[in-house]
Every structure is written in C-alpha cells, then in structure tokens.
Amino acid sequence: MIMVTIVVFSHLRWDFVFQRPQHLLTRLARHYRIVIVEEPLHDAAGTARLERSEPLPNVTVCRPRTPLDLPGFHDDQIALVAPLLADLLPPGEMPIAWFYTPMALPLLQELTPRLVVYDCMDELASFKKAPRQLLQRESALLNLADLVFAGGPSLYEAKRHRHPNVHCFPSSVDVEHFAQAQGAVASHPDQEHIPGPRLGFYGVIDERVDLALVAALADDHPDWQLVLVGPVVKITEDELPRRPNIHYLGQRDYADLPRFLAGWDVCLMPFAINEATRFISPTKVL
C-alpha cells in the first residue's frame, strides 16, 4: 500500500523542544509519510540548498539553507526556497499540506494538495517579533484551508467564526512518559547539587514567563530553590533574574524531563498575563 504524504510547513525546528508538532507527527508517521519543511537557515558561504535528515521512520526533515540573513519564511526567502521544493515529491503526487505557520503559505503553489490543514497551536501574531504580514497571511490560509485545528478552547473561540470547519483539538499529556516521574526513576543528576525544597518549571523561557514573579518568589523565599529547565528564546540572558536560589539548567532532551520532575517538590507554571499568553492552553495544567 502506497502511503499518502503529509508536507508540513513549520516555524519550529524538529530538534527544538519536543512539543505538539513532534507528538502529532510521530504518531501520524505510522500511517503517512511525513515531510517537514522548516524555516530557512542563514549560510553566507553557500548557495541555496535543502538539507534532509530522517530522525524517525517515515519522517523526513527538510532544512533550507540560503545566503539571506532574513528571519523565518520572509518573502525574499520564499523566492529561494520555492525552487528547492521542485523535487520534494514524485511527479504527480498529491500530498496533504499541513501548516503550523501561515507565513509559509506562498510555498503551497509548489504543491498540488489533496487537502490543506491549518493546525493553529498558538496565536503567533501575539508573540514577540511576530512578522507584520502574519495576520494577513493567516486570513488567506483560512480562506484556502479545508480543515482547521485549534490547539485549545480559547483559540477555538477565536477561530471558529472564521472558518466553517474548525475543530477544538487541545494538546494532551504523554501519560506513559511522564508517569516515570512517579515511579522508581531517580532524580536527574544535574540537579542533585541543588538542595530542597525544589520548585521546578520546564518549557520555553520567553516573553510568556513572568520573570518578575520568579524573581519575587526567589526573594520572598530564599530557602526555596527554583529550577528552570528550557531554552531562552526571544529575550536576552540579561533579562533573566539572577539569584543564588534560581537555577537555569538550559534545554534538555524530552527523555530527561521525567527525571527532573522526579526531583521536584512543587511544579510551577509562572506564565505572565499578557497578549502572548491570552490564547495559550498549557498541558502542564492537565
């Protein structure tokens, strides 16, 4: 049986934080061939090219490299990336086109899709450094899409009047994976030097995290140890509060997260209340 291909356009790197796209696509790969087109990377020394890797069976990650130092699926990047997709699929194949970012929409003309899916996992226009064309391009994608998923109830309410086939599809919890934290698994050795009680958070550290709250918590309770696991994105290291009882352990493999959890007394979710968090639906509350 020939597998149908899903071509995925994503603003998130496959080897970044393991989250909704990776969870869904690894499961879809049991039934479909998955081809992921990531945002271009800058390569001043080379010509435009497409690097391919296969991190899992039926999953191919395509990473464009171009001489342009421009962010994301910028219009000038699109002009260089589009020709690279000419031989992405066998001639005549009609894939499912799956979008995580509307900014890649111009690349749809390189395909003859049987179905267009928009998996809206975040309100990207509310994020820091969002492209100015994002709202306009999302409107165009909503006009073209056959199927729209909203990553949580608030996103669903924001999108359901804009498309006739919108479905609330919240993220969930990898129960088997995280149940390890309640079993016999030992705490991660990289935090064993930190005394208790440990209050932990794992996730992307960006404008959605209330850093002032983290600092105040550390100041009010100097005997509490705050452990933050995750990459720092879109903010500078200088913006991070520094205290003897705040510990930044950086991005870690998804496989390691249960071991960090196993060593925490309390789990934190210190999200700020701002435009970037207005539509989020964090699985950490489940």
Image (tube, grey):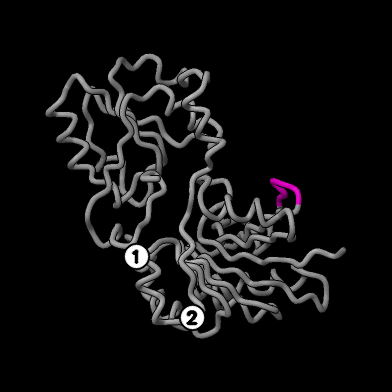
User: Which secondary structure dominates the residues rendered in magenta?
Assistant: strand
Q: Amino acid at mark 1?
A: Ser
Q: Nearer the viewer, residue 151 or 80?
A: 151
- Residue at position x 34%, y 65% in the image: 154
* Circles 2, 1 touching at the beta carbon (< 8 Å): no
**Stretch of the chain drawn in magenta:** 53-57
Quadrant (top left, top right, bottom left, bottom right) of the C terminus: top left
Q: Classify residue 247 by image quadrant.
A: top left
Mark 2 and mark 1: Cα distance apart in space: 17 Å
Identify the residue under disc 2. Answer: 142
Q: Is residue 134 above or below residue 203?
A: below
Q: Amino acid at mark 2?
A: Leu
Q: Position of residue 208 (x, y in %)?
A: 30, 51
Q: Please tell me whether mark 2 or mark 1 is closer to you in this view.
A: 1
Question: Relative to 106, is 93 on the left or the right?
Answer: right
Q: Position of residue 284 (x, y in %)?
A: 39, 44
Mark 2 surroundings: few (<14), some (14-19) or many (≥20) residues within 10 A: many
Question: Relative to 84, is 104 on the left or the right?
Answer: left
Describe the element under mark 2 as helix, strand or loop: helix
Identify the residue under disc 1. Answer: 154
The mark that comes first in sequence, 2 or 1, is 2
Quadrant (top left, top right, bottom left, bottom right) of the N terminus: bottom right
* Circle number at residue 106: none
Residue 204 in view (yes/no): no
Mark 1 surroundings: few (<14), some (14-19) or many (≥20) residues within 10 A: some
